[in-house]
Image: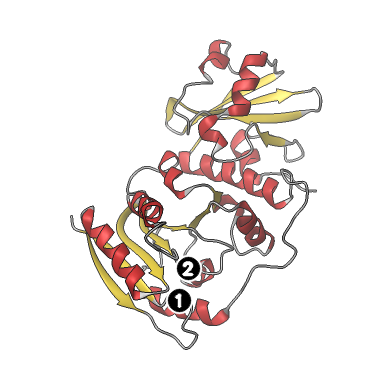
């Protein structure tokens, strides 16, 4: 079992043979910090302590790595960056053994990669309930690629929400993009990682409504979501919250595809209600199943 996170080793400047683990088991836990809180209450003693700070902003802490020898020799990475709690302040009353600098985006990639590897290797699962590989429909990917090509410049920074097992992501990759991807279903993300549909350092298991804890407003050129829904009167309030909160992370463009015209019009109207200029576009194909309609939002100013 290979649980090594290449990025965290690079950030911490430690030997590739040394093991590094995150204290928390999920991105959501990085907001709540259940394990970190227990560690701090326990008074855990470390042999070494590495403080990770934002590059060119030495007092802005990203995380702390503790070198432990019991029950095994490992590095344990703690971060309160996404909880805004200042929980780790007490650990720095004694000076760090070493301070390393990292770009904030690179640090997040390292954290996401470590969690993705643990997920892929079933570290947090008793057993995998999903035996089959994720669905792959070439016609759908071809259609999405044709639809997206005139909308997304080749060097766009893109966030894909509700990515599922990564089928739609393949269209973005064909356009030369390297998107951040998000879904709340850990099994879907795990299948996609095993199939190499998603990249470990950008595959996030998280409720989309919590993405703003990890990214600032307008962080991405575009936010996309493929086959959002199905949307009905009962679940629309939830979908509206997901789609609007995710749109706040887009600088210029939002693209949400749907199965029906009705859904696309509902989404477009919601975007207009919060200041976007939005249109509904048809995207029919011979299958008649996936991404038949889209709500395309552009910022008004």
235 vs 52: above or below:
below
Q: Element at badge 1?
A: helix
- Pinpoint residue 159: horizontal percent, then vertical percent: 44, 56
Q: Residue at x 39, y 61 (%)?
A: 156
Are the two marked residues, 1 and 2, in contact with CB atoms closer than 8 angstroms? no
The image quadrant that residue 212 belongs to is: top left
Q: In terms of depth relative to the viewer, which is nearer, 95 or 205?
A: 205
Circle nearer the N terminus (1, 2)? 1
Res 148 seen here: yes
Residue plotted at (70% across, 36% down) = 20
Where residue 3 appears, as percent x and y from the top left, is 73, 45
Q: Distance from label 1 to label 2 (Cα)?
A: 7 Å
User: Which of the two residues, 232 or 154, is positioned nearer the viewer here?
Assistant: 232
The residue that label 1 is drawn on is: 145
Compared to residue 27, the image places residue 51 above or below, namely above
Q: Position of residue 58 (x, y in %)?
A: 45, 25
Q: Kindly identify which residue carries mark 2.
A: 172
In the image, is 50 to the left or to the right of 168? right
Residue 214: which quarter of the image?
top left
- Quarter holding the C terminus is bottom left
Furthest residue in direction front, as rendered: 234
Farthest left residue?
301
Q: Is residue 272 left or right of residue 289?
A: left
Count of labels in the image: 2
> Quadrant of the rendered structure where residue 258 is?
bottom left
**Considering only vertical position in the picture, is 84 above or below 269?**
above
Disc 2 residue crowd, few under 14, some 14–19, many 20+, Cα 10 Å: many
Query: Does residue 96 appear left or right of residue 152 in this picture?
Result: right
- Would residue 151 be seen by someone viewing this image from the given angle? no
């Amino acid at each position: 079992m290979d649980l090594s996170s290449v990025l965290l080793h690079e950030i911490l400047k430690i030997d590739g043979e040394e093991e590094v683990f995150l204290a928390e088991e999920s991105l959501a836990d990085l907001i709540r910090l259940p394990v970190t809180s227990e560690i701090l209450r326990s008074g855990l003693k470390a042999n070494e302590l590495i403080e990770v700070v934002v590059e060119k902003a030495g007092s802005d802490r990203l995380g702390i790595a503790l070198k432990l020898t019991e029950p095994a020799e490992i590095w344990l990475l703690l971060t309160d960056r996404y909880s805004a709690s200042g929980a780790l302040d007490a650990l720095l009353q004694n000076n760090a053994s070493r301070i390393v600098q990292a770009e904030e985006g690179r640090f997040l990639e390292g954290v996401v990669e470590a969690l993705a590897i643990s997920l892929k290797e079933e570290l947090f699962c008793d057993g995998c309930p999903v035996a089959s590989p994720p669905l792959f429909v070439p016609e759908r990917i071809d259609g999405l690629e044709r639809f997206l090509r005139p909308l997304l410049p080749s060097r766009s920074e893109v966030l894909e929400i509700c990515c599922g097992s990564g089928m739609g992501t393949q269209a973005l990759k064909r356009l030369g993009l390297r998107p951040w991807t998000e879904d709340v279903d850990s099994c879907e993300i795990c299948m996609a990682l095993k199939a190499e549909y998603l990249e470990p350092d950008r595959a996030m298991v998280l409720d989309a409504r919590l993405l703003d804890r990890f990214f600032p407003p307008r962080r991405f050129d575009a936010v996309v979501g493929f086959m959002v829904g199905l949307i009905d009167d009962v679940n629309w309030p939830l979908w509206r919250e997901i789609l609007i909160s995710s749109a706040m992370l887009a600088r210029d463009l939002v693209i949400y595809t749907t199965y029906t015209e009705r859904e696309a019009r509902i989404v477009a109207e919601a975007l207009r209600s919060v200041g976007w200029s939005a249109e509904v576009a048809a995207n029919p194909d011979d299958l008649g199943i996936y991404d038949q309609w889209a709500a395309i939002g552009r910022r008004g100013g």
